[in-house]
């Protein structure tokens, strides 16, 4: 226990120091970041370049570590760049899932006391990493900035639980929230689904799987979603390494999650190949220096071609994982503020 407290204290001190560093003038950060990185005519944001530089100093890629250590490393990193944004209240609740209990975490913004719209937020992490603590700052930020209740889910991860365990869990959690909405202070007719990376994948799957039902979400918040587990898009090669979502990370996903899917074109694992007719309107944001850039844009195009109202934004200078950087510098928080405002608009009636 003493070692755990000491480790957490050191993490907090390091986090405060890093966040203080990124409050320096932008010109200073540009100098610290080094020579500008330009790929495909786009310039990497200096804050993103500096965080990648610091990450390289920290040690090996989290995906190179044993999975347990990699998970702990990601939580520590998320606390460093996310901090603990203020929010009205946070509470946990266990509910019945497909196999055992599912843990949900409820975030209520400070100015919400009555029935309000809500977002079911599904965390990223390649179906192998991530948990409620890993994405606590993201959910706090979205709840306060959008003025909506946020419900996060701690779904089952691979390799302990391969495909389709995560899909089954998020569908069960989403339906539970809708069915119990009134008792949770949630307007059942204004429930959105969203997530980042693998969470964006699962959010898109929820929207597809529930379309046409009384439980269908009214809005999707898709942050650099992983939409295609079957094909390799050009951006996967352009940004293969050095921009957080590494080739090694993709290999871990393939080994522990994708390999358990009998068909990589199954829409439950590759929503790009699903029927999107009639799904909820969406805000889909990609990062310009992200291996998932092309497939995210392709999914936005698919939605638009099907007549779905979609607002597509590419945050050109940013990298995968900017959603976690809600307390670091300027670029990440500004991008997430735009996402939160889109969520507010999408749930406004």
Image (cartoon, rainbow, N blue to C red):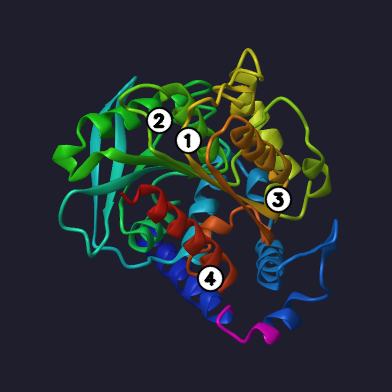
Secondary structure of the residue carrying numbered label 4: loop
Secondary structure of the residue carrying numbered label 1: helix
Graded by Cα atoms within 10 Å as few (under 14), some (14 to 19) or many (20 or more), the crowding at tag 2 reads many
Q: Quadrant of residue 233?
A: top right
Rounded to the nearest whole Å, what is the CA distance between mark 4 and mark 3? 19 Å
Rounded to the nearest whole Å, what is the CA distance between mark 3 and mark 1? 19 Å
- Going 37% across and 67% down the picture, which residue do you hit? 85
Q: Position of residue 333 (x, y in %)?
A: 51, 67
Residue at mark 3:
290
Q: Position of residue 90 (x, y in %)?
A: 25, 55
Q: Earlier in the sequence, mark 2 or mark 1?
A: 2
Task: Decide: is 97 above or below 243.
Answer: above
Contact between labelled residues 1 and 2, with CB atoms less than 8 Å apart: yes
**Any mark on residue 170, and which?**
2
- Going 44% across and 58% down the picture, which residue do you hit? 340
Span shown in magenta: 22-28
Rounded to the nearest whole Å, what is the CA distance between mark 2 and mark 1? 8 Å
Rounded to the nearest whole Å, what is the CA distance between mark 4 and mark 2? 29 Å
Residue 67 appears anywhere in the view: yes
Q: Earlier in the sequence, mark 4 or mark 2?
A: 2
Between 180 and 258, the residue placed more toward the observer is 180
Question: Could you tell whether 310 is left or right of 3 in the image?
Answer: right
């Amino acid at each position: 226990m003493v070692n755990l407290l000491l480790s957490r204290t050191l993490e907090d001190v390091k986090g405060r120091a890093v966040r203080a560093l990124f409050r320096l003038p932008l010109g200073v950060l540009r100098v610290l970041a080094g020579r500008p990185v330009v790929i495909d005519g786009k310039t990497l944001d200096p804050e993103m370049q500096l965080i990648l530089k610091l990450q390289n100093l920290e040690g090996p890629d989290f995906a190179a570590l044993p999975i347990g250590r990699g998970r702990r490393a990601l939580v520590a990193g998320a606390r460093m760049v996310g901090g603990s944004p203020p929010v009205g209240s946070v509470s946990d609740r266990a509910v019945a899932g497909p196999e055992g209990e599912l843990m949900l975490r409820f975030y209520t913004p400070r100015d919400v006391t009555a029935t309000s719209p809500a977002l079911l937020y599904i965390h990223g992490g390649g179906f192998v990493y991530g948990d409620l603590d890993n994405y606590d700052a993201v959910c706090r930020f979205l709840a306060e900035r959008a003025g909506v209740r946020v419900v996060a889910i701690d779904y089952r991860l691979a390799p302990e639980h391969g495909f389709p365990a995560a899909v089954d869990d998020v569908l069960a959690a989403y339906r539970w929230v809708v069915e119990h909405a009134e008792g949770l202070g949630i307007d059942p007719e204004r429930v959105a689904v969203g997530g980042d990376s693998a969470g964006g994948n699962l959010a898109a799957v929820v929207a597809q799987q529930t379309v046409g039902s009384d439980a269908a979400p009214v809005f999707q918040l898709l942050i650099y979603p992983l939409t295609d587990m079957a094909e390799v898009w050009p951006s996967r090669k352009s940004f293969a390494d050095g921009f957080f979502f590494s080739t090694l990370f993709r290999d871990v996903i393939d080994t522990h999650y994708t390999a358990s899917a009998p068909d990589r074109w199954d829409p439950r694992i590759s929503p790009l190949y699903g029927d999107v007719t009639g799904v909820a309107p969406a805000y889909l944001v990609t990062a310009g220096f992200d291996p998932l850039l092309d497939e995210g844009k392709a999914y936005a195009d698919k939605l638009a071609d099907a007549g779905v109202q979609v607002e597509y934004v590419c945050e050109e200078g940013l990298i995968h994982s900017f959603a976690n950087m809600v307390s670091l510098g300027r670029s990440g928080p500004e991008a997430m503020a735009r996402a939160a405002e889109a969520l507010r608009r999408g749930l406004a009636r």
